[in-house]
Image (cartoon, rainbow, N blue to C red):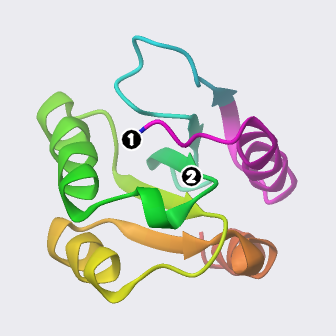
């Protein structure tokens, strides 16, 4: 699952900061178990996000592996994958089954604004 786009990661982190998240950190380096961005929501929930520039290179197995890692380490309350483009139905199904929020980067500005109001 090596399709991290650093520009997308930077954009996600900037939108989180603008939306009121605290302690937003870009962790896109080896050793962070596939997590690209972490942040703390205004309600205290910890968020782990993975960013992918090419949704066609992400598989349902990748989605479940990321969800399992987040669960196993108890590092997040919300686990999310952001892709730069529409995701195929098998990925959306895998995310739903694994309890992961799956967001297309094109709708990310709208999504972060909505989340910051709801938090």
SS assignment at label 2? strand
What residue is shown at x 28% (from left), y 56% (from top)? 63
Quadrant in which residue 27 is drawn = top right
What residue is shown at x 70% (from left), y 38% (from top)? 22
Quadrant in which residue 69 is drawn = top left
Residue 6 horizontal/vertical position (percent): 74, 35
Q: Which of marks 2 and 1 precedes in the sequence?
A: 1
SS assignment at label 1? loop
Q: Which of 100 and 78 is in front in this view?
A: 100
Check the picture and name the quadrant holding the C terminus.
bottom right
Residue 48 horizontal/vertical position (percent): 45, 43
| Apparent side of residue 95 relative to residue 39 in the rendered image (left or right) | left
Q: Residues within 10 Å of mark 2 (few under 14, many from 20)?
A: many
Q: Residues within 10 Å of mark 1 (few under 14, many from 20)?
A: some
Work out which residue is located at the far bottom of the displayed protein and give it: 89
Residue 100 horizontal/vertical position (percent): 32, 65
| Apparent side of residue 71 relative to residue 8 in the rendered image (left or right) | left
| Apparent side of residue 59 relative to residue 109 in the rendered image (left or right) | left
Q: Mark 1 points at which residue?
A: 1
Q: Mark 2 points at which residue?
A: 52
Residue 5, magenta (yes or no): yes
Check the picture and name the quadrant holding the N terminus.
top left
Specify start and end residues of the magenta stretch as a single range. Answer: 2-24
Please report contact status of discs 1 and 2: CB closer than 8 Å, yes or no: yes
Residue 26 horizontal/vertical position (percent): 66, 27
């Amino acid at each position: 699952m090596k399709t991290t786009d650093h520009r997308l990661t930077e954009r996600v982190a900037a939108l989180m900061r603008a939306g009121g998240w605290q302690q937003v950190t870009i962790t896109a380096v080896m050793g962070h178990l596939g997590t690209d961005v972490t942040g703390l929501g205004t309600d205290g929930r910890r968020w782990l996000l993975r960013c992918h520039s090419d949704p066609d290179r992400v598989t349902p197995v990748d989605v479940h592996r990321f969800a399992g890692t987040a669960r196993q380490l108890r590092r997040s309350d919300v686990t999310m994958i952001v892709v730069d483009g529409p995701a195929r139905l098998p990925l959306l199904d895998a995310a739903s089954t694994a309890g992961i929020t799956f967001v297309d980067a094109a709708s990310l500005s709208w999504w972060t604004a909505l989340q910051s109001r709801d938090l």
